[in-house]
Image (tube, rainbow, N blue to C red):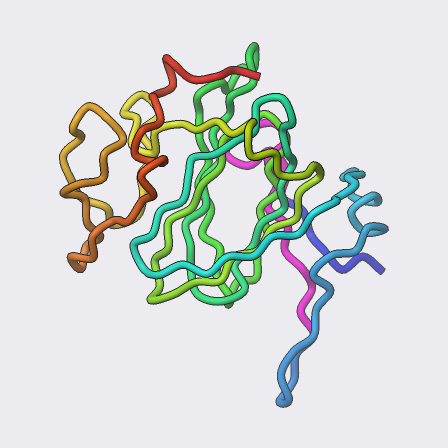
Amino acid sequence: MGQITVERNVNGIEGLCVITPTVHGDSRGYFMETYNADDMRKAGLDIRFVQDNQSMSAKGVLRGLHFQKQYPQTKLVRAIRGEVYDVAVDLRAGSPTYGRYCGVLLTEENKKQFLIPRGFAHGFLVLSETAEFCYKCDDFYHPNDEGGLAWNDPIIGVAWPGVTGVYPGSADASGYTLADGTPLRLSEKDQKWAGLADTFRF
């Protein structure tokens, strides 16, 4: 019996899927299969994952938007603690949805997973006090192959929940905050990525 349900082509973007596991719970707690290759194949998602990653981030941390150029990765992502707003941007040349994004709320409560195929930029914003985030990749990390896209590019127009600030003409996060005043926190590198017009296409 399959232990997942799959919502395909989320936000009208081919290949993006939200996967919801079956959770078996009672007064003791719960159990669920977080990954089952047979169930994935039966759902038409035959992917060979080779690397698992996990991170912990504080509220207001925004990581992204990232991709690898010559070694693109399919990612299966989820929040195991806390709450994040996860974003994928279509960078596939010739795609009818090129430049369009999809954002999904991933929390430890909803236990949803977001499947992001190769050819997308990816990032997330932490909305809870802390969040632990993990993801599976179908290719290895190549540090000299990194690419990125400005998180606040107005052409894409990601509606990051609760974020306020004035676009300064770059990915600089100075002056941006969450609704409660928490400042956005980005790496120096993530504040230097260019916008869609000057970004790598797959």
Side of 39 where 12 appears, left or right? left
Q: Is residue 178 above or below residue 119?
A: below
Q: Is residue 120 visible?
A: no
Q: Is residue 12 above or below residue 131?
A: above
Front position in the image: 2 or 197: 197
Image quadrant containing the C terminus: top right
- Residue reaching furthest to the front: 144
* Number of marks in the rendered image: 0
Image quadrant containing the N terminus: bottom right
Side of 162 where 54 appears, left or right? right
Q: Is residue 142 visible?
A: yes
In the image, residue 43 lies in the stretch drawn in magenta: no
Side of 190 where 164 appears, left or right? left
- Residue reaching furthest to the bottom: 27
Please give the range of residues in magenta. Answer: 7-24
Q: Residue at left 67%, top 60%?
A: 21
Q: Position of residue 32 (x, y in %)?
A: 70, 69
Front position in the image: 162 or 183: 183
Q: Residue at left 42%, top 46%?
A: 124
In the image, residue 8 lies in the stretch drawn in magenta: yes
Q: Position of residue 92 (x, y in %)?
A: 56, 18
Q: Residue at left 20%, top 57%?
A: 182
Q: Position of residue 178 (x, y in %)?
A: 22, 52
Q: Is residue 1 above or below residue 18?
A: below
